[in-house]
Amino acid sequence: MLRRPLFGSILAVCLLAGACFLLPNLQADIYLMIQLGIAAFWAIALHELGHVIGGKLMGMDFGYFVVGPFHIGKGRKGIRVRENRSWGLVGGVALMLPAPSRTEERHRKDLAMMTISGPVMSLSLSLLTLAIWQLTEIDFFRTCSLFHGVILLATILPLPNGAFQTDGAAFYHILRKTKIGICKIQSAKLMGEMYGSKRPAQWSASMYKECRKKMENTAELKDIFVEVMFVFYIEADKEGIKPAIERLFKQFEIKPNKQLSVYYGPFLEWRMLADALSASVNEEKLQQYAAGVSSLSEGTYSRMQAMLACSKHKEALAYTKEAFKAYETVRGFGVLEREWTRMLANRIRKSAEQAVS
């Protein structure tokens, strides 16, 4: 539990509160730390909110946005706030989905506006809080202005950002219609279908053919990550998870790699799941695949933990519940993920019953 952002945040607050009472001579420093923490949190949260507002202004559909220990997304009865259990997403992320039936050029404009809206929000708030500080001389607003400025610089400059791009780099590629920009637009269209109201077997046949064609002409999975996921979900829904994932493992070299866990992690977990559901689990392979699963995807990571803890039935079932919660309100591919999670939970229950008898 302490490894989760929410409990980490609560622990930090408790430690600071305790230090205030036990070390009164450090109260000024502790108050400063609290002030910095609040300013940093709001700078990140409002930056991500900027992406959401920009996307909504262009008619895009709201997917979710995550900041700190909070995950805000669509629920069955409107907006739903739940716990973010992944430290990898604490720094903030927003997902906006393209509206269907729009031209390629309109998708480009929508995506460009959504991408640049985060830095624009940070710039506006940095100037606003700086002006408020000048008027009120309240130091907290100066701190807020500083953090908004830091977030602006960190996101607008084309700096190295691991497996992702900064907003500035992405905006440049989309605006200039570079190869990377075109790929981002196509990926956004696929994501719109994947998060839509249809289950994978009913997704666009033309999109499936385009993705299949790309897969035939590309050697590296990471270069067409979204396209491969799109194809996998459709084939897994129609044929079953085992033949679909085995086909991918034959076509691509998918091995545990910490640096590429964002790309390979989901496929390694699906490989584990296919074996677990078909009762062909190899413990050594299970451990090997698990080493490459990223914690960025809460659902796949929790389900992976369930498979590793299969012999401890109560613990394993608790992990399947966490995995199910991650997909509970997700449409599209979420339907299939929920079905797989139920199947895994049922297999664990049967194993527990057999152990008792």
Image (cartoon, grey):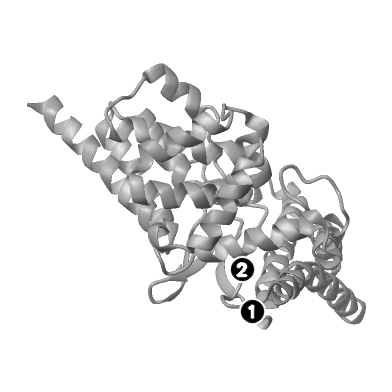
Dot 1 falls on a residue whose secondary structure is helix
Q: Earlier in the sequence, mark 1 or mark 2?
A: 1
Contact, CB < 8 Å: mark 1 with mark 2?
A: yes
Disc 1 marks which amino acid? Lys
- The crowd level at tag 1 (other Cα within 10 Å; few <14, some 14-19, many 20+) is some
What residue does disc 1 label?
56
- The crowd level at tag 2 (other Cα within 10 Å; few <14, some 14-19, many 20+) is many
Count of numbered circles on the image: 2
Dot 2 falls on a residue whose secondary structure is strand
* Rendered-image quadrant of the N terminus: top left
Q: Residue furthest top?
A: 284
**Taking 353 as reference, is 105 left or right?**
right
Q: Nearer the viewer, residue 325 or 95?
A: 95
Q: Residue at x 78, y 46 (%)?
A: 161
Q: Residue furthest left?
A: 357
Q: Quadrant of residue 277?
A: top left
Q: Residue at x 51, y 29 (%)?
A: 250
* Rendered-image quadrant of the C terminus: top left
**Taking 295 as reference, is 352 left or right?**
left
- The x, y position of residue 105, in whole percent, is 74, 74
Q: Quadrant of residue 254?
A: top right
Point out which mark residue 296 bears.
Answer: none
- The x, y position of residue 312, in whole percent, is 28, 29
Q: Would you place residue 337 above or below residue 136 in this image?
A: above
Can residue 298 be spotted in the picture?
Answer: yes
Q: Residue at x 69, y 63 (%)?
A: 185
Q: Nearer the viewer, residue 356 or 345?
A: 345
Mark-to-mark CA distance, 1 and 2: 8 Å
What residue does disc 2 label?
96
